[in-house]
Amino acid sequence: MSVLHQQLPAYGYSSAPYAYGDPGAQADFKTRPEDFVVEEVLGFEPSGEGEHLFLLLQTDDHNTRYTVKCLARLLGVRQRQVSYSGLKDRRGVTSQWFSIHLPGINTEPDAQQLAKEGIELLRFDRHHRKLRIGTHKANRFHIVLRNTEPGRLENRLQQIATTGVPNYFGAQRFGHDAANVEEALEWVEKGELPLDRAVRSRVLSSLRSWWFNGRLAKRVEESTWNQWLPGDPILLDGSQSFFMEEVWTETLQNRYQVGDIHPGAWLPGAETQGLPDDMRHFLALAAMKPEPRPLRLLPSNLQIEPAGATLSLAFELPKGAFATTVLRELLRLNDLSV
């Protein structure tokens, strides 16, 4: 077993410590696609003109990459001309924005052709810039959990609503049985980067997320995941903007309590202290620099509707956050989509 394997058992998610202890209660998750609904919140209005066709599409049981292939084929463009802001899971009902670079082409999407592929056209417009990864502001979730006992969850729900949860990267980031992490470790041990751009992105993303989860897990064990410590970046809510402070003041505490700021930690780069040499070398090859990420995840607009053995939840999370990270603190999930 490599040094990296020893740094973080179970890749920092499946066995990661809970902020409020083992939840005990269970529920069936993703029993049917409509039990997991995601609405992408763009955060700005398309300008109405430009070379990029913006589409808001709803898909049922399709992932983002499948939709990209369909759009490229139906519009007669290359897949690289189709852009999106975030990857969405297959199992669920998803509303997501896409952009297609169509310079000099004034065309409208064919809703009927899209419908034949199981894709519903909700809206289209033009914009002067393409979508890039992380462009959107947030994701809104509507989730139905079945075969559970909502009455047992009231205290947990209150804790989550007021204090938040540790901002772990979800298991989706690491692939089935953490295969993406295993792949990343193989490349680290080789000491070279994958040539394929998609593979390189997947490997770097899973490796850095895995490392972050390990650091966060340690903070959870020490009960400091929701506290600022010297050297921590301080992030503005819903933003990558951050600042550094030498002292935690009463003003900062007040801003923290209302959810305006969050203490953070670093996604590793080549300059990050404490990295094994082979991982540092690998990140240096990719010219990766440290990036801040909040330690605390605070769901907004949380709504709860119990009905017998069913619990319906609605909440909004900033981009890059995982709904399953919130749910794992509430109860143990029997994921029926696997």
Image (spheres, rainbow, N blue to C red):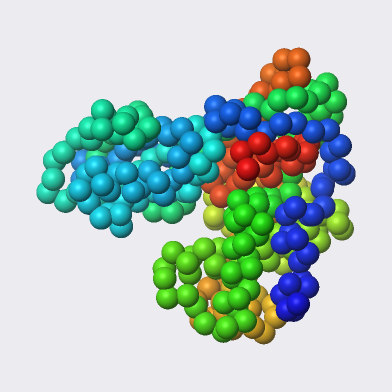
Number of numbered discs: 0
Q: Nearer the viewer, residue 17 or 178?
A: 178
Locate residue 19 relative to residue 334 in the image: left or right: right
Q: Quadrant of residue 279?
A: bottom right
Residue that appears at 86% across and 56% down: 221
Locate residue 336 relative to residue 250 in the image: left or right: left
Residue that appears at 71% across and 31% down: 28
Q: Quadrant of residue 24?
A: top right
Q: Nearer the viewer, residue 176 or 142?
A: 176
Q: Nearer the viewer, residue 300 or 104?
A: 104
Relative to 224, say whether 314 is above or below: above
Residue that appears at 41% across and 32% down: 58
Q: Residue furthest top?
A: 308
Quadrant location, the C terminus? top right
Relative to 246, say whether 115 is above or below: above
Query: Quick check: can you spot residue 131?
Result: no
Q: Find residue 32 and report its horizontal and vertical position in percent.
A: 58, 29
Residue that appears at 86% across and 43% down: 22
Q: Nearer the viewer, residue 55 or 257?
A: 55
Q: Find residue 172 and report its horizontal and vertical position in percent.
A: 60, 51
Query: Quick check: can you spot residue 72?
Result: yes
Q: Find residue 113 and report its horizontal and vertical position in percent.
A: 26, 32
Locate residue 219 relative to residue 282 in the image: left or right: right
Quadrant location, the N terminus? bottom right
Q: Find residue 337 and report its horizontal and vertical position in percent.
A: 61, 38
